[in-house]
Amino acid sequence: MIDFLAMIPAFVLGWIFVRLLAPLESRLEVPLGLGLGAGISSAIFFLLTWAGVASRISTIGAEAVFIGAGVALLFRLKRPRQERKTAAPPSWIWILRIAALIAFALVVMDFSQSLSANPDGGYDAAAIWNIRARYLAGGPQSWHYAVSPATGTNHPGYPLLVSAFVARTWTLLGDLRSSTPAALSAIFTLATISTLVAALWTLAGEVFAWLAALLLLASEGFVSQASVQYADIPLSFFVLSSVAVLAIGAARDWPPSLVALAGVFASMAAWTKNEGLPFLAFVFVAVLWRGGLRSAKCFAAAAAPVLILTLAFKLFVAEGRESMFPATASQAFQMIAASSRWSEIFASFARNFWELGPPWAHPFLLMAILAWAFGFAPQARSRVWMLLAPAGLLAADFAVYLITMSGLTWHLSTSNNRVIIQVWPALIFSFLLMLRELPLAADNHGKRPSRSKTSK
């Protein structure tokens, strides 16, 4: 519990930022603020560490300054919350509510059992994320070990959002307890589920919100990753948040505030894992395609600060280079030309998509049933742009597998299921927005409530 208490200032900071930049429905502001707060606080802590002044006092002081300034701006600007009416739910909505509650309870039980069996998470948690957090929390004497291969740290150039936030929390607590990374994993898992539910509730109503929750909680790949303390669930949160905020922006004629907020979330994906960099590029293309040049400029300006921080870290702080890439272009072309590599990668993606859930309740089967029951909306084609960034990230992962020097079979077996999970919540979100919505139900006064559009 004390871990969560130490994280509260960061989450408050994230909520204030969301509220200031683009006031949304209250149910959506909170989960967005959880993840964004972790990202902002990790960036602040890293900058303090890089400057050689990271400590409990400096960390608390810096966050207090940002929170104070944000509260002052909130009172000064008095931003109104964008509460919008949605269709009244059908009488049988209680079935979906109970089903979602039961599914969530089962996930909580699975999470608790996994942590009881392995409180330190999976192998990469110890070898990459948590060991780097320990070095970062050690202060001026040790933090450079987190970015140096000389000390045996795996992937010293990996972005630092997860490790820096864990180190920040350890610094505030004054000890390196193993419950902190687990608490952060729980927060990001909850934030991802809540963002998916709240965003679909905003755009398509309560029925689709709970259906989305059931689809995600039925995905064994997502549930199994919740407790391993890697950066893939946090990355899935930022991928989903970027797509969801842009979808809401498209429904509201691309207001600059929502486009800017999406840019911040996309840049946080780049600060979370290497995969976030190509994702950021694909989101920019999607904004340029659907929102036009003005929106693209707004998106780029908002993404620039964290992107610059990420690139500065990789260029000026992290030592060494990733050994998984070929040293020469000719070597890369030889690997790309090998048909056996293509077939092995395709087979791995097919297998890991199949292993997302049991056959009798596989997410694809549930999606097929929903597509048959609801049908696709007439404007479904105009919403395909939402798939560009998630699909582009999968394509980028495919390209990395083609030229990996780490041993293709090993690389696929240890990571392919996780790269699918990175985009899976966003794919569920985009799929459900393409279905035909339920007819609007009359309210208590015999009038039909208004409903926001879902595409430009």
Image: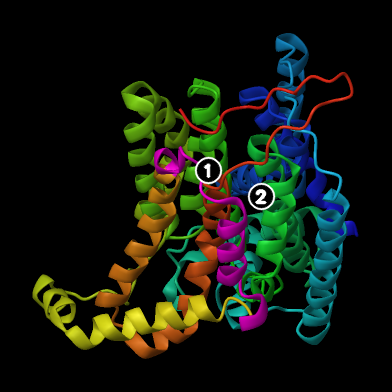
Residue interval drawn in magenta:
359-383
Q: Nearer the viewer, residue 450 or 292?
A: 450
Helix, strand or loop at label 2? It is helix
- The residue identified by callout 2 is 196
Q: Quick one: which residue is furthest to the left in this view?
A: 330
Q: Vertically, is 117 above or below 169?
A: below
Q: Position of residue 351 (x, y in %)?
A: 46, 83
Q: Residue at x 79, y 19 (%)?
A: 447
Q: Quadrant of residue 257?
A: top right
At x 50%, y 51%, the residue is: 269
- In the image, 303 versus 327, the foreground residue is 303
Is residue 283 found left or right of 55 in the rendered image?
Answer: left
Residue occupying the point 40% across, 25% down = 295
Seen from the viewer's position, the closer of residues 54 and 184 is: 184
Residue that mark 1 sits on: 242
Can residue 145 be seen by looking at this rendering? no
Residue type marked 2: Leu
N-term mark: 2 or 1:
2
Counting from the top left corner in percent of width and height, residue 175 is at 80, 65
- The structure's colour scheme is rainbow
Q: Position of residue 319 (x, y in %)?
A: 38, 65
Quarter of the image with the N terminus in it: bottom right
The disc labelled 1 sits on which kind of residue? Answer: Ser
Location of residue 121 by image quarter? bottom right
289 left or right, relative to 74: left
